[in-house]
Image (spheres, coloured by chain):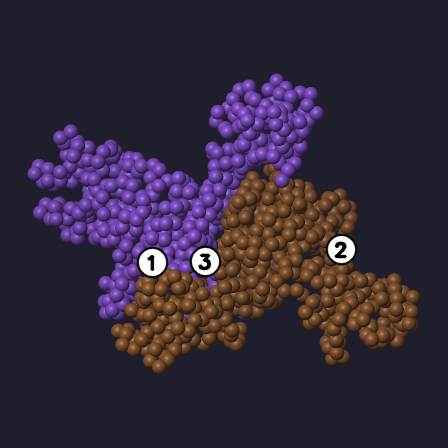
Chain colours: A brown, B purple
Amino acid sequence: MKYTHHNNELNKNHIGKTVFLKGWAAKVRNLGGLIFIDLRDRFGITQLLIKPGNAFYEVALKVRNEFVLEAKGVVIERESKNSTISTGEIEVEVIELNILSIAENPPIIIANETDALEDTRLKYRYLDLRRPVMQNFMIKRHEITQAIRSVLVEEGFYEMETPILGKSTPEGARDYLVPSRLYPGHFYALPQSPQIYKQLFMVAGFEKYFQIARCFRDEDLRADRQPEFTQVDIEASFVDMNDVQEIVEKVLVKTFKKVLNVDVKAPFLKMTFQESMEKYGNDKPDMRYEMLIEDYTEYFKTIDLPLFYGKNQVRGIILEQGLVTRKRMDQLQELVKKNHGEALATIKYSEGQYTGSIVKYLNETELKGLYLKEGNTLFLVPGQFEQVSSALSALRIELANEFKLIPENEFKFLWVTDWPLLEYSEEEARFYAKHHPFTAPVDPEVLKNNPKDAMAKAYDVVLNGYEIGGGSIRIHNQDVQKLMFDTLGLTKKDIEERFGFFVDALKYGTPPHGGLALGLDRVVMLMTNTQNIKDVVAFPKTQSAKDTMMQAPSTVDSVQLEELEIKVGK
Amino acid sequence: MKYTHHNNELNKNHIGKTVFLKGWAAKVRNLGGLIFIDLRDRFGITQLLIKPGNAFYEVALKVRNEFVLEAKGVVIERESKNSTISTGEIEVEVIELNILSIAENPPIIIANETDALEDTRLKYRYLDLRRPVMQNFMIKRHEITQAIRSVLVEEGFYEMETPILGKSTPEGARDYLVPSRLYPGHFYALPQSPQIYKQLFMVAGFEKYFQIARCFRDEDLRADRQPEFTQVDIEASFVDMNDVQEIVEKVLVKTFKKVLNVDVKAPFLKMTFQESMEKYGNDKPDMRYEMLIEDYTEYFKTIDLPLFYGKNQVRGIILEQGLVTRKRMDQLQELVKKNHGEALATIKYSEGQYTGSIVKYLNETELKGLYLKEGNTLFLVPGQFEQVSSALSALRIELANEFKLIPENEFKFLWVTDWPLLEYSEEEARFYAKHHPFTAPVDPEVLKNNPKDAMAKAYDVVLNGYEIGGGSIRIHNQDVQKLMFDTLGLTKKDIEERFGFFVDALKYGTPPHGGLALGLDRVVMLMTNTQNIKDVVAFPKTQSAKDTMMQAPSTVDSVQLEELEIKVGK
């Protein structure tokens, strides 16, 4: 290319050199006839100077923000240095200036700080992405992707592509469907994950596979969900749980080092699902702070306290320091109830005094027996294990954020292990797979005789309170796979229609195998320290699965529907 | 992992070592009580030996082809060496043998050679892919993908993902549609290419983008087409045609060197579209052999020959050597007609004699004037330029294959340049974009005043007769883009509805930009020297867009259609 430098490169060493630059006019100033243009590209900014009398002075006068320019000039030392940019010691006195493209005033200011609404930002995504902070998210995503891939390639994994036009096997989330033109009334489905394909790669003997795979779920969206998302899909043969975890640790450790220069220690901590539920109230604990859940059931058994009458459990957390106002306490009550908690009780100890909603039911000895320290507030929730856990988990996170108990720039990884294989739905009187129906049981005999107690060879990797990956050793035995489907209540016909080919595939010499899928969007979100998954997706959909820039989904020509032999309407 | 070696690694240097291997039983022989098992993994084969009296002899007796095994043993020198495999000097005398997975007799023999029908191979794709030759296709695909990517990353391109759930803008091929559940009656479309998104990345200032992108076309399939395919999508700002071509050459040269150790010379040859049509009859000439089309129009003007009466052109090719039987000549006549040629005339010169369908119309001098050499056959087709070109192109390829004029293991790259911008459809009395509606005209004034003559800043890269990539400099000026849509007959309303946001995007400072997309599947096909695109796609669809392994497309639950508010039927 004919341009000599990016806009972050020039410094004192280049003084006197003739250079050829290009970029966008980030700022244009006219100071007593001297025209200064901040020329911006994806790398940085270089200041151009055009003096009166310059042959291109008239051109320079026309330049407005966001015009695209190319400029030839000589590097000179700046009079007033700018230490905030890498080129702050120099400027380029222009010899030639060409306007490559003009620009209207953009609806979004092209700067890191923005007060534009999300709607505007999404509609003009191509301008939102021009803001350096957003460019940096995309560039970091690129770097993270390359780092992850290079570790897997080094480790002998093959990157292989699997179809996007697949088969609908609804189990769990809703599929996106694609009507077939050649077989009217028939549909492809977009994959929720390449799970079956990657297992077939193992059947085919590839031993080590990965893919940076696009996946799709037609679910109602949350802040950290998109209808399409990207996962780093990993599978290997002849491995046990430990082998998979080691590979994933290697990937994450090297990626954090390469991209963020952060040292992460491996092996990661391990915690059982049960312990995580007990101590943190959820299965993806944020290990950056304590405030663990404690069990007070025994303690309150001997105390006459109407709120706790007949409750299975009383558990709680202690906020060590911090003022919770009456109004705030009402909000926390609401939070607890929204998260399935029956009630919230508190005891605070401060300056020798106990206060709080249930203090009056406890005598001095009983209060002292809580061993509260100066400033401590004890939050208690009574009820069943699941409900109490859910409520205290939400409360713990809320308080940690409010009282800034979460250290910044810390990355705490954790393996959550020893998962139950199944979940029982009382409502539907049937079992669901806790992970998915291809997860191997620790003991097939337990699955057969006592499915409620069956444990899974499954493991999730958690970072700072987010599940960033889920994996398992898979079933590689046809009979166990049939037993699993059977336990999930699939009829023989269901199995045959949906998974017949897969059950078939298992009988021709399937090696033991397992793997894991990392949620790339979430990993990038956490590594770039943003809260919004949309920031790390180039062209995201809104909360209601809409692309407001392109206006998709949209109506289509009736002839398109006729060709597909489908009709719109209930 | 606990295994010590792959099955291609052991040789004489390992004799005496204890090793731990795993893999599939590729062959089991029992020779006078000695059991030999060829243990296969993705790397190669190692021979296991189990003697009578071995504690695992009974286990070994159970092993059948495709059982999955692990074996501990000691490396010993083989009595009868096998020079065809890397481990042919040794074998492993087994100390411990475990069956990890049993196998039924597979419906496809797991060997490079197969007589299985394509139907069977696709239905049992997971077994077809177990054949070493198929594994090699996938592994080469992996290597090619990594090589291409690493060049682009080195060159400063960012890998960025674009949506699969996009908007339908039918222009050219048919879109695959995805009904929206949240907006009944509205549809997403799967992208035919990330064209608009990649241009928006340029608007956003990323300057250099690439993506190994999945694309979709709901078209009737040919042997080298699949409903979904992968392209290496490249775009850069502040570039001209030469810059893009240089990048692509760098990518291809380095990839061929790295993966095949083949030296390709850059810059590639260049040929105009017009010259390609004249000399080869098509726009993707195979440069590995000559047999160029010559113009005989002037020559036959003075000869009284009814077949050529009133014909615009007479052009032909010369087959230098080779016997074309009467029966074969009839088939070639058919081929010419199938490819829009009006007629095929021949003159052959052999042993001083002229023979062929039109010899009787020419006198001695006229025949000599053709300067045919011993053994030459001249094939002539009369008619309009396009029809003659099409017919002679097909004939040239057919003869080259038949008479083995195509050298093996040669890679001849070519840039086809100077394309017309538009194509006029007499039938519909409208223009179509020869590439796509975002291709920049060489001169917008010509597009405005005389669209038929407008030339494009477009270039295709051709390898061995296949178009492996198409690219262009894009329109970056709003007015030119509007003019282009206008010339294509889009109404203001069409433009607004389909491309409004894009035309809008161009007005906020769009840099000049351009790019190219390489067809990855085709590149892999050519580099692995196979004729069938299905060989290089892990899970391909049939010619009728079906996945016969998974049985997709398939019918779906009526509740799924109810949720989408669509109905099946004309």
- Under circle 2, the secondary element is helix
Rendered-image quadrant of the C terminus of chain A: bottom right
Q: Residue at x 51, y 36 (%)?
A: B131
* Along the viewing direction, whichever of B546 and B20 lies nearer the viewer: B20
- Under circle 1, the secondary element is loop
Q: CA distance from mark 2 to mark 1?
A: 60 Å
The three-letter amino acid code for the residue at tag 2 is: Gln
Mark drawn on residue B158: 3
Residue A542: x, y in percent?
Answer: 54, 69
Subunit ID for the residue under disc 3: B
Residue B545: x, y in percent?
Answer: 47, 51
Q: Which residue is mark 2?
A: A274
Which is nearer the N-term, disc 2 or disc 1?
A: 1
In the image, residue A8 sits, relative to residue A202, either above or below, namely: below
In the image, residue B524 sits, relative to residue B442, either above or below, namely: above
Subunit ID for the residue under disc 1: A
Q: Residue at x 43, y 68 (%)?
A: A88
The three-letter amino acid code for the residue at tag 1 is: Met
Q: Nearer the viewer, mark 2 or mark 1?
A: 1
Residue B433: x, y in percent?
Answer: 32, 62
Q: Residue at x 33, y 62 (%)?
A: A17
The three-letter amino acid code for the residue at tag 3 is: Tyr
Instruction: Kindly indicate whether the residue at mark 3 contacts the one at mark 1 (C-beta within 8 angstroms).
Output: no
Residue B321: x, y in percent?
Answer: 23, 33
Instruction: Kindly indicate whether the residue at mark 3 contacts the one at mark 2 (C-beta within 8 angstroms).
Output: no
Q: Which residue is mark 1?
A: A1
